Image (cartoon, rainbow, N blue to C red):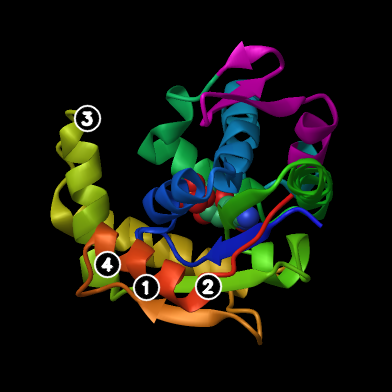
Amino acid sequence: MALSIAVDGPVGAGKSTAARELARRLGILHLDTGAMYRAVGLAALEAGVNLDDMRAIERVNESTDVSVTFEDGTQRTWLNGRDVSGVVRTPLASMAASMVSTVGGVRAVMVKRQRAIACQMGAVLDGRDIGTRVLPDAQFKFYLTASPEIRAKRRMDELRAKGDMQPFERVLTDVIERDLRDSTREIDPLRPASDAIIIDTSDMTLDEEVERMMEIMGPNVYYE
Ligand code: DC
């Protein structure tokens, strides 16, 4: 069985960067599953539908094709054949992703695609429901977390590096709002799998996070 590793946790916990580095060290793919929900969120925004209208989102989802490709280990996310890898990173797309990801039809399509990718090739998947739904049999499951303030600070720094000067309070409010929606939705809410290893990254550097994961996996990590 191909090596599959689940990395779940709330926004700003450091999942994506840690998962990418872990995948690089192990020589397997990194699948950023949030980017796929972001692409559906973007499709809903572009269709001009009310994001509270679940039926309208279901309809958008039915006419939307989200796919991913990998070039030298870097993921590209496609929406109906258009490369949306960059444009899905805006705060508006983040909020739209959080809203469309509450819709059952959207989750069903995404989970199926994500499983197919993980089964074909070894991969580190980062998301919210990887350990609980997408890959309940993953060989390793990590749940990364950190205080809301630290996560908001990381998110703010990330936005500022791209020239988006959001005030801290605004970013913190967004983080708390997304946490609440992601963890209270009916279908596959954000929560650690019962067999996940929880790592609080509040006082850790990226290197320390990855080292901790490698240490937990031990020297016998294998893949085919
Ligand atoms: O990881 P991210 O911030 O890019 O994710 C964007 C949104 O997508 C997040 O608010 C919740 C949703 N999501 C999800 O429901 N399940 C996943 N496996 C990944 C993301």
Tell me the residue at 17%/34% (across/down). 161
Determine the secondary structure under disc 4: helix
Q: Which residue is mark 4?
A: 208
Tags 3 and 2 touching, CB below 8 Å: no
- Image quadrant of residue 3? bottom right
User: Gap between marks 1 and 2, in whole Å?
Assistant: 9 Å
Tell me the residue at 59%/69% (across/down). 220
Tags 1 and 2 touching, CB below 8 Å: no
Query: What number is the disc on residue 212?
Result: 1
Tags 1 and 4 touching, CB below 8 Å: yes
Asked whether residue 189 is in view, the answer is: no
Q: Which residue is mark 2?
A: 217
Number of dots carrying numbers: 4
Residue 140 at what x, y percent from top left?
62, 71
Tags 1 and 3 touching, CB below 8 Å: no
Q: Earlier in the sequence, mark 1 or mark 2?
A: 1
